[in-house]
Image (spheres, grey):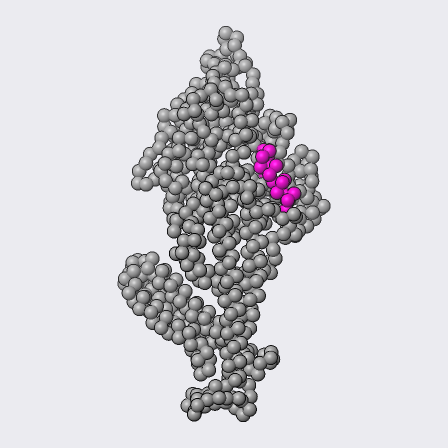
Amino acid sequence: MVATADPLAASSRATDVVSRSNATRYLSTAAYVDPGFARAAVDEILFTPHRAVVPSVGFDLTVVLRHCVDSLRRRYRTGLVMVVTALVALYLASYLLSLAVTAFVVIRFCRWWLRSRRATPEGRRTGVAGRVLVSVLVVLVLPFGVLGLTLVMFRIGFVVPLVLFALACLLVARQVATAWAEAVQAPARLGRPAVTQAVLLGVVQVVAAAAAGVGLFLLWHRVLDWNQALPDPGFPSQLDPFGGNGDEIAGDGFFEPGPGTSTRGLGEDTVSVEFLAGLGVQLVGALAAVASWYVFYRYRRANHEAITRMHPDTWDPSDAPPAPGEVTDRLAELGREQREGNVTFFSGPEPFLGYGLPVDDWNFAVILKPEDDDDGGRDGTERDGREVEPFSVAELAAHVRQRVGALSGTDLPVRDRLHGLRIKERCYARGLLTGSDPNWLPDPLRAPVSHASEELLRAVRDDSDGWVRHYDCFEVGGWAEEQIVVVLLHYSISGGVLHLEFYSRLLPPIQWRFRQSDWLLPLQHRPTHLRLVWQSARDWPAEVIGSVAEVVAGPPRPGRGTEAASEVATASRLHRQVDYGARLSLRDRAAARAPDHRLQLADLAHHRQVVEKQVLEAVLDFLQEHRVDVAEFRAFRASRVEQYVVNSFGGITTVGAMGRGARGTAVQAGGAGAGAAPVSGSPR
């Protein structure tokens, strides 16, 4: 037997490298790529102190949270300035902005419609007609945006909502006609109910389009009336280019100034001073809109630079943004839990939150009877007088940990070691608790304990049927901690029967969109800079609208969790049940649906087989040393070893286990489980 000094101590030393792991770097990138990711991390983990935290497998939680707080604070400041400047622009240049937004909505809607149609064979057949339609729409819409002032002068700006209404009616009519034709051509397949449903759906869509068109028409005139009804802010008619003192549109369509209007001109051509003032106000409003876009562009640029600094050549976790003073203590607490925590309180049906996708589970029961006891008496002794040597669950668990830890021991050559192996003990319990508990919930207003002492671990291990369960966790990291295979073991002895539970989980690599730090070019690359400018202009209108809710919600601060804390305090005072369990795993949220390629699938099978075979051998040797009849367990081990195969066919890799009590799961490269879709997204 090859032994190691202390596998648990070696595992604790191995956790020091997670701060520089790729998983930490990618999750820090996710804070700037996906605001929803950062918001969930801050609200659910940082600002909710009464909830437990799941294990941070392969990454440094505190580094990621610091980037999340920095991203949200920067986003709030940007949103506040962007919304204020956009409101100023809307007040001063409502005509120009309404026309520009109308053009933007029409073009984006047409692009979306074309993409959805091309997803079907019929849509691909109508691709040419779709492109012609978009060209016509662009020709119709762009003049309203470029010559907006002229359109307002001639009072024909209401044509834009009419165009939208006509376009919606045409698209819906075409959709109804297509559905009707398909139903008529295949009545046997669709049936009369399908035809009726298609007609009713088309009628509903036509009515909805009509209501939307009428609403846009009324809204447009409401904007015009609202602008004309505004008090005079300093110019004679700064929001109405037509002036407010008798200026009119003549019957021939040309502008004629009213009495008292200063003009200059040659012959019949005249220019109103009030019109020039209104034009100036419109231009000032346009400059406010440009300023709002520029603020958003600077935000996107800062995020781009933050992501590029996370390249492997320049990444340094110690350079993470400093934490605000109000969350420093909470971050320090989370750091201690990450290093020393061995207890997880979960919320929901899945206890192993944070360990990824389920791959393969099995359980087996061994009757603790002496060897060759088939002809023995009922008193549990053999005819030669030998008995089963008593043992405890703690002794069996220590033996298995020692044997598995030997796979990465220093006694083996470097090339033969199982690199990335970490061994931990962890307790799992349901997070629904009532009242306080001196061992697990000392303070009802705070999260349950995250670290159990050796005495408490021993008590949990010996109480195999308690509400807190003890598991040995074997983690094997690969591909620079991007993919981690986890094996969890639970042992219990009850009624003279040893029960073994085996669970294997897979933490797949991080999603492609969160790996931008590997392939994103710096802004010194001119095409990259121009692409950033274009994307900022394209996304600016939607970001302005979305920022309103974020500005109202306020900046990220600990006070945002006071409502939940108040509910917990009230429930605790009334002795009601409270859910303290963890609900979010950042690693699971950012993970892809499965390994990226077959090499990672091969490593999944390899690491699982190595750990499982070592566990089976260790349990078998331990039972034999204690004179337990292992005939059934030996047969079970043989079935696992011989029938544990990796079959590759049709692009699906099935990691199967056909032993008694085993359950296999199909994992596909690019998808998780049967029928899963491939992982989409690639570096651009």
Instruction: Name the residue rendered at 59%, 27% in the picture.
Output: 461
Instruction: Name the residue rendered at 43%, 67% in the picture.
Output: 104
Of 537 and 541, the residue lying toward us? 537
Q: Give the image location of residue 207, x and y in percent.
A: 43, 71
Q: Give the image location of residue 186, x and y in percent.
A: 28, 61
Was residue 339 drawn as part of the magenta stretch in this picture?
A: yes
Instruction: Name the residue rendered at 47%, 25% in the picture.
Output: 408
User: Total of numbered circles in the picture?
Assistant: 0
Q: Give the image location of residue 191, x and y in percent.
A: 33, 60
Of 583 and 269, the residue lying toward us? 269
Q: Residue furthest top?
A: 384
Q: Which residues are magenta?
A: 327-345
Q: Is residue 586 visible?
A: yes
Q: Is residue 582 above or below residue 126?
A: above
**In the drawing, does residue 470 fall left or right of residue 132?**
right
Was residue 145 drawn as part of the magenta stretch in this picture?
A: no
Prevailing secondary structure of the magenta residues: helix
**In the drawing, does residue 53 fall left or right of residue 639?**
right
Q: Is residue 22 above or below residue 645?
A: below
Q: Residue furthest right?
A: 573
Q: Is residue 589 visible?
A: no
Instruction: Name the residue rendered at 55%, 66% in the picture.
Output: 85
